Amino acid sequence: MKLIHYTIGKLSVVMIVILTVWAGIFYLNIFDEVWDETDDSLENFKTLIIRQFMRDTTSLNLGDKDLMSQYRIRQISEEEAVRYRERYFDSTRFYETELDFDPIRVLKTAFRGPNNHYYELTVQISTMEQDDMLQAMLMWIVILYASLLICLIIVSQIVFRKSWRPFYHLMDWLREFTLGGDTPPLDNPTKVKEFQTLNETIAQMTRRSEKMYNQQRQFIENASHELQTPLAVCQNKLEFLAENTPCNEEQLQEIGQLHDTLRRAIQLNKSLLLLSRIENGQFHETHDIDMNRLVRETAEDFNEIYEHKEIKTHIKEEDQCAAQMNDMLAHILVSNLVKNAMTHTPPGGEVTIDIKRNEILFSNTSDNPPLDPDRVFTRFYQSDYRRKDSTGLGLAIVKSIANFYRFNVEYFHDGRHNFRISL
Amino acid sequence: MKILIIEDEKSLREVMARSLEKERFVVEEAGDYASALQKINDYDYDCVLLDIMLPGGSGLSILEELKRARKRESVIIISAKDSIEDKVTGLDLGADDYLAKPFHLAELNARVKSVIRRKQADGDMHISIGNLSVFPDRHEASIDGKELKLNRKEFDLLYYFVINPDRLINKTALAESVWGDRIDQADSLDFIYSQVKNLRKKMKTAGATPEIKAVYGFGYKLVSEPEP
């Protein structure tokens, strides 16, 4: 739910309550006023009639009818007159023209005539119909409510759009923002104090995260660099030791194992360095890479290496595939994927590489259960079938190269293990 | 043959020096920018191994200095920064080769020999050990003048052995010399094993006097004059 809809929703509920209460009070007040006026006119009328009657009892046409008001004079006995109480009341009268009963207001009173006779005077006046009035009022209140609502929506749209513009701008900017990405700095001028504070806070926060992120990236790169020399010393000393010290076979074997372990550390360090280099965007130079050729050559190399596994490799070149990327990264990308496929294929298995115009699909047979597609590209992903001598970084490197060039790389399992890279 | 090693890490410098001395090179060492510059100005070397990050200055300015003085030294840059930019800058400035740390001693040896060979070779160079001759530029080898038929990988292996004669070469160094270091060691070792086996068989059949010996668990060694 958008903020503006929420606000309008709340306002319209409040408006209904206010208008309802207001309509009730308005109705009561108006009717009170109308009755008051009606009763006043009846009173006036009465005075006029009685005064006329006093002057000349015959001058009045008893029971005279006019359109709006009527009166009637009836002679009553003295006892009746003494007990008589003047009263106003509502009644109805049938109009032939409308074939309907219309509401009237009636005044009944008694007075003593000039001839000392007592009379009862009934004055009645036609009043407005309450039902009609009520209906009309209701209708107009609904119209008022609707038009107020429309105005409210229009006004709030305009006001919202204007006054919340910095907020929405900020939101868009945040959505675009990625750590280590090339998001332009926040440019969101506003006179509103709250938004200014928000801008400042967010700019500060992102700057801080960016700084920390860069430091961390730099740290991995520096650490890997610093490790190179000690690793080189260890490796070369071991080699020198093996070559120049009279060792028996058992000792040599121990040194060999030590050397192998050290090689793993070196490999791991190199992979980490490569990863942070890719993420730091240090591979600028790009060329047109003929992916078909690259895949063919890489597969050929790996076929030689894995000759003993007797893997059947099929390369289906459905189309020419070219990519704009760094030479070295292209090689690493393809060889990591080919290597991954080959190492996880059991002896006698099958690797298929399907090259289309904008995608390359590497698939291999394997009895291993499907991998977790969300985690397979994370660093040091521990699948149950990970080889003990793997760095656990090969696919992470693939992913980070893909991210760097905005390629899409995904894993899925359909009986075979598939890695698809979409350029 | 005189070699100057410019490297600030003392233990690395020493082990490099001792390894190269075994190949009968005369080795001198410099541990910082100033002493390196002084040595270069005072003496002539056949090959300079140059670390880029030095206390007191950049190895690249030493390289520039060398080229300005029109010295004929071959230069191999040795750097912990295995970055393309450094490599390109170094080679553009006139370095002959680039070796990233950490490296194998056998690899260092091979690189040094090959830059020196390139500088000296005006015509057809070959390396001979016993009755085995290897022609690196033509990718050919012969035994007693008769051509030894080898595939590309077998030749690469043989060349690596020949340039490191009588040295114990670690099997991963061999694998990396053939495949580059991007290939995991464990995967390529089976391949190295079978390729070396084939190579030994071919050499034996052709009656070569040098012999490739396996050192179990560590690697191989080309013995130039095996005891009978």
Image: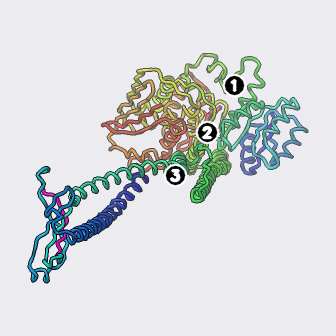
Q: How many marks?
A: 3
Judge depth for marks 2 and 3 and give the one in front: 3
Is label 1 in contact with label 2 (beta carbons under 8 Å)? no
A123 w.r.t. A358: above or below: below
Percent across and percent down for residue A60 are: 17, 64
> In the rendered structure, which segment of residues is drawn in magenta?
A99-110
Disc 1 crowd, CA 10 A, few/some/many (<14, 14-19, 20+) = some
Given the image, what chain letter belongs to the residue carrying mark 2?
A: B
Judge depth for marks 1 and 3 and give the one in front: 3
Q: Which residue is mark 3?
A: A164
Picture quadrant where residue A409 is located: top left
* Residue A100 forms part of the magenta stretch: yes
Identify which residue is drawn at 11% across, 70% down: A74
Percent across and percent down for residue A171 are: 51, 50
Identify which residue is drawn at 42% across, 21% down: A317
Picture quadrant where residue B213 is located: top right
* Residue A190 forms part of the magenta stretch: no
Given the image, what chain letter belongs to the residue carrying mark 1?
A: B
Helix, strand or loop status at disc 1: strand
Percent across and percent down for residue A347 are: 37, 35
Residue B2 appears left or right of A152: right
